Image (cartoon, rainbow, N blue to C red):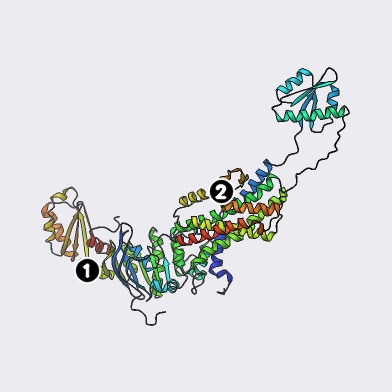
Amino acid sequence: MPDAAPKAALSVSNLRKAYKDVVAVDGLDLEVRWGECFGLLGPNGAGKTTTVEICEGLTAADSGDVEVLGMRWDADATELRQRLGIQLQETQLSEKLTVVETVRLFRSFFRRGPEAAEVIALVQLGEKRKSRVGSLSGGQKQRLALACALVGDPEFLFLDEPTTGLDPQARRQLWDLIEQFKLAGRTILLTTHYMDEAERLCDRVAIMDHGKSIAAGTPRELIASIGAEHLVEFSAGGAAGALDVSALGRIEGVREVRTENGNVRMQVTELHQAVPALLDELDRQGVPLTELRTHSASLEDVFVILTGRHLRDE
Amino acid sequence: MSSTRWADHPLAQLTLVRFREFWREPEAIFWVFVFPVLLAAGLGLAFRNRPPDVIGIAAVTPELARSLRQEKLLDVEQLSAPAAEEALRTGKVALFAAPSPGGAVVYRYDDTNPEGRTARMLADRAVERAAGRADPVASSDRLVREPGSRYIDFLIPGLLGLNLMSSAIWGMGFAIVDARRKKLMKRLIATPMPRHYYLLSFVLARLLLLVAEVGVLLGFGAWVFQVPVRGSLLDLAVLCVLGSLAFSALGLLIASRAQTIEAASGLMNTVMMPMWIVSGVFFSAQRFPGALQPVIRALPLTAVIDALRAHMLQGASLAQVAPQLGVLLAWLLVCFTLALKLFRWR
């Protein structure tokens, strides 16, 4: 046990990891504070899972420094394993065991923690406790995986894409559970490629792309950093070619205009002024509107603006 | 629930998991318990020792037929000469006997047919004895048909060895590669589980199942075919445990790096198939050329089967099968050491 509490629950500096022909993590710095829920965001292949697995002591880094709960993997692996709760992305638990058998197995590895029944109730699988793992739905399996991460009463919880592949209802159920752990004061590191998930759950996030952190802060800070509160998108159908884009950029309150396959995307600070002005301008140019959408800026927009790509693009 | 309960020990939990996964897989139960018994029953039935065959012959006169019927090993039919000729030609009888002038007898048979030659000797003896020949030397028969020297006695130790090999290699190999493929192994090593407990749980479960496996096959052999176990049961236990451990180590080595079930089962078959053939499961390994014998004897399956046969059929002690024990021990140590060096946990 560390005497003086280290200032961060997790600190990663200048982390690098390359596989045969791909650089998965390329000089990453991260800091997760005690008791916060930290989100690692990014598209598939951004290096999130590699980063998390290095932090979990499952993968060796090529270089860089990782300190978890003030300890290091090369010196304190046994102690760290007792104090971390880990949920991996693709684990398939044994289908022939029941829920309670699976949780008891994992519970037996930890020197302290809640009873199996208690954890099962916590993840709302009480009615399924005698069911075979093979008969559970995707959301139930994911909650069982969560139960297995919680049996050791961990101080620090690693969740790698906990809601990927789940239907909206199952996702919301899992979010509620994760929010409960936050309230219980646990530190959480969560990876996701759903920006709405990160906005809802995370106190702070880092956006990863190509193995690097390209932005970090609270979701609110990141959204504010793009300097636009709203986004306006419209399409002009067949008349898009006739559009004078530079004139749009001169409208008051419009910060940036991009066109993409006939769609125009504008970052806007003052929506109530910009939209009427846009309509007037299109009218003046004689370009008809076929579609018009506005929404408040989100982390998704932050990613698009920083990388020029959508998160879901592979 | 107190935390000191034995069942909450990680090793107990891991071993329980092995059992549950085994019992909940009906195919595994079939291959480990039912298949060897079916094989033993089928082969035991096919190669059972039958009472000596009675040879059919024909005689053309009632007097000859009466003389010939004194011989128990002949089935004599009285036929007319043309009918007897026909019966011989179509193989219904092996020989026919006809009188010839001057009280002599003519035997007609095919001398390239062993049955015909046997019939000739038996028929002639019966005819001579009926005519009053006395045998100058008294003789009597003592038949060897006792348990221990029949095919089924040879087969059961072979099947037992085969079962020790397949259940250890499949049991170990499949479960480990499957856990690796499903990333379950990676999940387990992300917990504080001591890694040697994971491997030890396979060995423990194997040894416990071994009692049932060996019991079922030997019990079946003893009950249905009276196959003997002449050595001590303790020695038998030592042999089976050592054999099973050696094969488990081999299974662990096979499974140490494979990432897919396909790769693992290919490897397992490559390792096991040659031993199925050369190690003397179904027929003696001595049938292979002398130059190959040292190689065949160094195989773990040959060692286990030779030792089991010597123990069960000749009542050999462990000291008498020391060379085989040495071979098994060597396989155990080499495979286990290599497997630990090569083993991939993810």
Name the side, left or right, on which A169 lies relative to B37: left
Q: What's the residue at 38%, 62% (across, down)?
A: A163
Nearer to us of marks 1 and 2 is 2
Which residue, given by chain and number where applicable, does mark 2 sit on?
A: B275
Name which quarter of the figure residue B89 lies in: top right
Q: How many marks?
A: 2
Image coordinates of residue B15 in percent, x first then y, are: 56, 63
Disc 2 residue crowd, few under 14, some 14–19, many 20+, Cα 10 Å = some
Q: CA distance from mark 1 to mark 2?
A: 70 Å
Where's the C terminus of chain B, which quadrant? bottom left
Q: Nearer the viewer, residue B150 or B11?
A: B150
Q: Is residue B260 placed above or below A124 in the rendered structure? A: above
Disc 1 residue crowd, few under 14, some 14–19, many 20+, Cα 10 Å = few
Where's the N terminus of chain B, which quadrant? bottom right
Residue extending farthest right: B132
Q: Chain of mark 2?
A: B
Q: Is residue B129 placed above or below A77 in the rendered structure? A: above
Image coordinates of residue B149 in percent, x first then y, are: 71, 46
Name the side, left or right, on which B234 lies relative to A273: right
- SS class of the residue under badge 2? helix
Residue A54 seen in render: yes
In the image, what residue type sits under mark 2? Met
In the image, what residue type sits under mark 1? Ser
Image coordinates of residue A210 in percent, x first then y, are: 28, 61
Give residue B331's mark: none
Image coordinates of residue A152 in percent, x first then y, are: 47, 72
Give residue A225's mark: 1
